[in-house]
Image: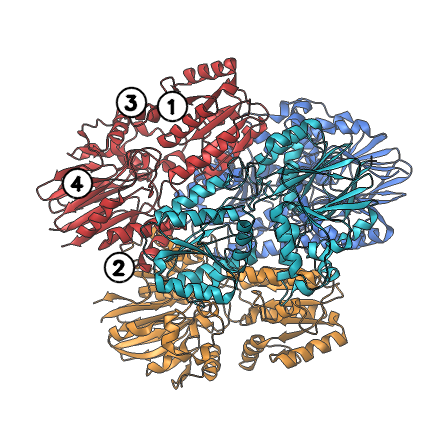
Chain colours: A red, B cyan, C blue, D orange
Amino acid sequence: MEIEIATIGGYEEVGRQMTAVRAGDDVVVFDMGLNLSKVLIHDNVETERMHSLDLIDMGAIPDDRVMSDLEGDVKAIVPTHGHLDHIGAISKLAHRYDAPVVGTPFTIELVKQQIKGEEKFGVQNDLVKMSAGETMAIGDENELEFVNVTHSIIDAINPVLHTPEGAIVYGLDKRMDHTPVLGDPIDMDRFREIGREGVLCYIEDCTNAGKKGRTPSESVARRHLKDVMYSLEDYDGGIVATTFSSHIARVKSLVEFADDIGRQPVLLGRSMEKYSGTAERLDFVDFPDDLGMYGHRKSVDRTFKRIMNEGKENFLPIVTGHQGEPRAMLTRMGRGETPYELDDGDKVIFSARVIPEPTNEGQRYQSEKLLGMQGARIYDDIHVSGHLNREGHYEMLDALQPENVIPAHQDMKGFAPYVDLAESMGYSMGDDLHVTRNGNLIQLVE
Amino acid sequence: MEIEIATIGGYEEVGRQMTAVRAGDDVVVFDMGLNLSKVLIHDNVETERMHSLDLIDMGAIPDDRVMSDLEGDVKAIVPTHGHLDHIGAISKLAHRYDAPVVGTPFTIELVKQQIKGEEKFGVQNDLVKMSAGETMAIGDENELEFVNVTHSIIDAINPVLHTPEGAIVYGLDKRMDHTPVLGDPIDMDRFREIGREGVLCYIEDCTNAGKKGRTPSESVARRHLKDVMYSLEDYDGGIVATTFSSHIARVKSLVEFADDIGRQPVLLGRSMEKYSGTAERLDFVDFPDDLGMYGHRKSVDRTFKRIMNEGKENFLPIVTGHQGEPRAMLTRMGRGETPYELDDGDKVIFSARVIPEPTNEGQRYQSEKLLGMQGARIYDDIHVSGHLNREGHYEMLDALQPENVIPAHQDMKGFAPYVDLAESMGYSMGDDLHVTRNGNLIQLVE
Amino acid sequence: MEIEIATIGGYEEVGRQMTAVRAGDDVVVFDMGLNLSKVLIHDNVETERMHSLDLIDMGAIPDDRVMSDLEGDVKAIVPTHGHLDHIGAISKLAHRYDAPVVGTPFTIELVKQQIKGEEKFGVQNDLVKMSAGETMAIGDENELEFVNVTHSIIDAINPVLHTPEGAIVYGLDKRMDHTPVLGDPIDMDRFREIGREGVLCYIEDCTNAGKKGRTPSESVARRHLKDVMYSLEDYDGGIVATTFSSHIARVKSLVEFADDIGRQPVLLGRSMEKYSGTAERLDFVDFPDDLGMYGHRKSVDRTFKRIMNEGKENFLPIVTGHQGEPRAMLTRMGRGETPYELDDGDKVIFSARVIPEPTNEGQRYQSEKLLGMQGARIYDDIHVSGHLNREGHYEMLDALQPENVIPAHQDMKGFAPYVDLAESMGYSMGDDLHVTRNGNLIQLVE
Amino acid sequence: MEIEIATIGGYEEVGRQMTAVRAGDDVVVFDMGLNLSKVLIHDNVETERMHSLDLIDMGAIPDDRVMSDLEGDVKAIVPTHGHLDHIGAISKLAHRYDAPVVGTPFTIELVKQQIKGEEKFGVQNDLVKMSAGETMAIGDENELEFVNVTHSIIDAINPVLHTPEGAIVYGLDKRMDHTPVLGDPIDMDRFREIGREGVLCYIEDCTNAGKKGRTPSESVARRHLKDVMYSLEDYDGGIVATTFSSHIARVKSLVEFADDIGRQPVLLGRSMEKYSGTAERLDFVDFPDDLGMYGHRKSVDRTFKRIMNEGKENFLPIVTGHQGEPRAMLTRMGRGETPYELDDGDKVIFSARVIPEPTNEGQRYQSEKLLGMQGARIYDDIHVSGHLNREGHYEMLDALQPENVIPAHQDMKGFAPYVDLAESMGYSMGDDLHVTRNGNLIQLVE
């Protein structure tokens, strides 16, 4: 059976991931993501109303025109998890393919919401939920399996396409976490089993390949966060926290430790409400019954007023703004634009790391400056990454023993340390280690 | 009563700490430390045989000649804990003073060993053990108290000299740890009480004043280390670990996790044997009965041979060399100079951070290169600092409300962020915030 | 005669410089500067209409309330050169003092323009021009002298107040340039002479004290710029350059090399027109007769249209925007908001260094990204600093041999390397080396 | 005609360059270099006595075993210039090939000296001198041409193999210098001409591809050096300078400026004597008749003694040790191991940049510390690179318009920015942009 990989997006950048695998006449598309930074650099761009081709020209969504070179029918569009760089282009591209979107329940829910917000295209693809551990036939001879992985969002999987020629493991976006705070540990047993059955190709996310050691478990971040929050137990002023809205495990830890130190947690900001609300509705997390979540500006401000009235020492607002985004809640608090008043000595907890790019660094710096001008004390960097470090990659290659390896989810500089690693383990560029770019076809079996 | 502070050493550098406090006619000396880097930059220097004056000229030990300007009698020499930069000059300087060395039991034990190794001077001072929480009269009107603190070595205290004019808190070298792995949490209650009683002066270690947030608890490092070691549970080759020899809590965690993952821990290297042996003898830590500790080159090599014979998959050697020191055990292993043979895929765990100075960074880089050439996989930076970050300093000032503050244990660049913090809390340079240098006298009460 | 120094502003930051010297009954004020970053962090602030007290509260201008503690009459307000951090608060503070503003001709001209733009206060102080090498009596016993120095703006001086107790040298903002491109070399002979006559106090700008070596001459930047521009001689598309508008020597080099490579230079942007226009009107620089300078948006756009019509290969627009300021000309070009169209391969020359602060770095990064998206090729960092490096400071101290030294123009971290240097030359903190903060009085002679 | 490229060494590192080009039956080998860092990491290694295979195993010299897969006869071994990473393996590998070593006169002279020092192998290859601009027939159909380039060593060329299928340009190690201090400017006219004739393949050194702008001309470094040295004209103590021994243009500038400021230059250190002596003997540089050059320890020490006797204010020793190498002359001076005594205020000029690798950085830091302990003042970083920055690469690709591009002389991370550049100019990985590794064959024409 012919096996071909189309590397459509995310092979020259982080963002706009998209990869298609053809096994005989069947094609599966993995991810359709958005590169948000390509949008934000322009003033006043509203993606909801834009045409795909304009977004492709901007480099914001994958250029899927290479798909026409791929003979075969798309049988499924498979986002691996709910982050925008993996699902954000579905509303712009999926309607071109007569195939369902297949994802885990949480991911599908987020896809649904994204499609709802779309104003340009009508997206009619079926949305099919499939959980980790389950499988689905792809044509007559292939099978799609979801293997549970751990990442900075819940319900993440690595899809595996089992073909007669061996498995294709699409390995994007995971940490090797044996003690995650929410959900099951990464299913290394299944990966090792698949490795023994035979892996034709492994496509891997190189984000942290240059970082030594292993990415710590979310339990380590949780222990760190606990240490910070418990140390503030006696503080009788305001404490505010921020983290990635989609990071439900972290939000859960914040909520629990707030309770432990005698404060009522409240989630504030549009995306806080969206992700946590969805997770709770789908029973992925068990929040206290009275946990408030407010997204609209008005209800947020009303909540802030209530907090000020009832005494801010009784609350822990968990807000958006961890990267210092100019219009996010925390930045607005720093500018004194909300009813919440910061006093000298109040604490701000960033349970997040600055994404290392000068624009973010500048904005975050400004945000911390503004908060500091209000008297706030800053606790930052209470976080672990959602991506494998070098030794995680080493272990994955060791477990899967793939015949072919394709580094992804980075630019060339990001591929470099992964290439070094793979070569040190016997792979060889131009042979079984395929360093490639957006828009290429790699024929693995002819 | 006249109160005067002599800032003898450690006010222009990290290393060679020494401060004297005169309260009326009584003088207490805090710390007598060694700046090892000033020794190591020279080839072939053996401090054991050197005269104090030569070491003073090298900048290696405190220049205590300013003591002659201080009227009064030295009543005690008080090292705060057992690190070399706090006790390393006792064998060179203490004999000049007719006063006992007063320290916690573990510290005194290390002082004793250091004096034993001294070849130039006969040091006859009494060595007096006093534990955290205890007090001692200093002359008729003053009292010395030891307040328990948490640091990267056990049995650390902050000495407080209670005078009729208020307390002098000598705050060097601590982390605010409420959940240390060994010993008691920092005694913040007592600090707050002393704060309410009235603090005339607070002398503080500025090492991490420029780092945001709070220093995590040793429990966080332990959780991180556990994550790394448990993730290696299935590995059936060699695993080697290194950390600061004097960091007994960390050694203890390494020993316990080794056991958890089915490996027998062994401590190797002269200083590993010295510190852990001492801690065990004094009952500060409860190691397994059969824990091997070997310091001499011959017994180390014999142990390595035994490990190779019995199968290195059954052992966890815990060795010296975390900074890549050229002659330390781990570096020798990297050079293939020991009987322990590293194979492809073997793991090396650095439970330590590189001390950020180009010499160390160069040596550590070389060490990792050599280990990598043998096939080793590196896990590094599994560590938390023993020094307060900015928010810890904020909390200490808030707790003590001292009348005067003296930054210490850094150079001017290191003082800068502490000065910024103290000023933001209302202190004022040239008034109650005393930025000073080695060799000065500060008269607090005339 | 009593001599006192009031360290009013710029002793905790770069920006809002202000120092007063009292010699007997006469007071001279050196500099009244603005800290622009304290303004820009707020949205929508217009300093022209703001009251001094609000600007003081923001930390934007010096808090001159300490002046009431200084007995004596202000005889002169002396800005050292025309940069905003030295003259930017004159329009807000000078009217409080019954004294002339005394500066070099170029500086006075810029002060005049600044006062003209002021909308809140009526500033009526006399504006007195005095050139380098000239002197003025200050009361009966003191004399003010201007010594020529070299900086990144023309007509910069170091004022020296000669008193019966020795000279007070106010040494802010200079490079030791023996071959400046415009104006005379730094007058080291006069400094050495003053040193021999006796210097009571030297107040020094520490900006680059941490940088090794000496700051290169403007001739070196010019040689570098020549190398870049000549290398582009054969390019037949667009070339655009940007630099500090007030850096007339650099603008002159750009203008000359433009001519050398067959392109007509044009200065575009409000501040480009202001500074270069002023310099030309006062005969500080000899530009070609037909050199266009356009400040208003409309005339700039008209010029861009003309350039596009006549062929951009014939022009070198020299524009504002070297720090990536969001609304500056070059950033607008990057956004495609001007009639000038960038094509693939067009060159953009940044004859400037990014001021190392995350906000600037973020903005400059965005600007370069936008220019790159238009196809532009970037040549950056063609620049030398206007401030002394460490060895320049060493030479100044060696030449002046001052009795007292006061580091200025930095925060504490910035003072640190200067303190290290001064100490290594025998000065001693707390004695003749005065590390101080905003708002203090230092009595040198009682 | 079949054209094949064997990428033997330097495609995974900087060091041990070696590339072979087969055009029909004729093979030309470009460079045979040594990776010195792979040698130095081991203690006590003497390469002179080592076998090639051991050095190959260490990664120190190219693994030329792939040559056996290349059908055809080696007609020439062509080092591009005299740096060790281009000629250092000739004495270990050249004897395996029945072909002359063809290089420019200076390069050949250095090859000759290297062969002389070899103790393991007898190297009998003819050594043929050919100058820039000259050509040589390679078999019946191909021609080898030397195009003049500018680098940090004199007499550097880029060899071009003209084949019936187009030119192969081996572009390693150059800066685009239109005003070099010694020798002719880079021959861009000839490159453009070759570009018009048709370039089949361009092999390029990526060292600085990640650095923005263009590499400045040696004239800029010379102007910078002049600025530093002239500024020291009045200093009446010791001045010492160091630079790359092989950088004859820089040595010449140092010698000339020494004379200008009234000091007698002397070259000290084994490699100083070797390179400058060779350059002078071959008439590449015109040094003053009485310029002393001393290599042997004894004559160096004798010279130092003479300098101390006659007054060190009359001399400028130009010595080895710019990277802080532990046994080099300058480091020994820092340790006080030579008769030259440094006094407070003496100047040390590093006309070199630290090669950015932790080992060097550590050693250089130590060296500067030691010099500083003797009182020396440091002037560093007076240097320009010998390698093209990004815009130089842009111009080369623009001039040559090659059909195929092969990045070289770096690891994968170093290739990354070059790949970005080439792609932005229309090249495409996997098609005409060949990112490859050591030991591969690339068939360009079948």
Q: Which mark is residue A430?
A: 2
Q: Residue at x 35, y 30 (%)?
A: A248
Q: Quadrant of the N terminus of chain C?
A: top right
Mark 4 Cα within 10 Å, few/some/many (few <14, many 20+)? many
Marks 2 and 3: same chain?
Answer: yes
**Relative depth, front residue between C311 and A366:** A366
- The earlier-in-sequence mark between 2 and 3 is 3
Quick check: marks 1 and 3 in contact, CB under 8 Å? no
Using the image, determine if residue C191 lies above or below residue D34: above
Q: Which residue is mark 3?
A: A281
Q: Residue C306: tell me if it is visible.
A: no
Residue D141 on image: x %, y % = 27, 77
Chain hosting mark 1:
A
Q: Which residue is mark 1?
A: A270
Chain hosting mark 3:
A
- The earlier-in-sequence mark between 1 and 3 is 1
Q: Residue at x 67, y 80 (%)?
A: D290
Give me the C-alpha separation between circle 4 and circle 3: 27 Å
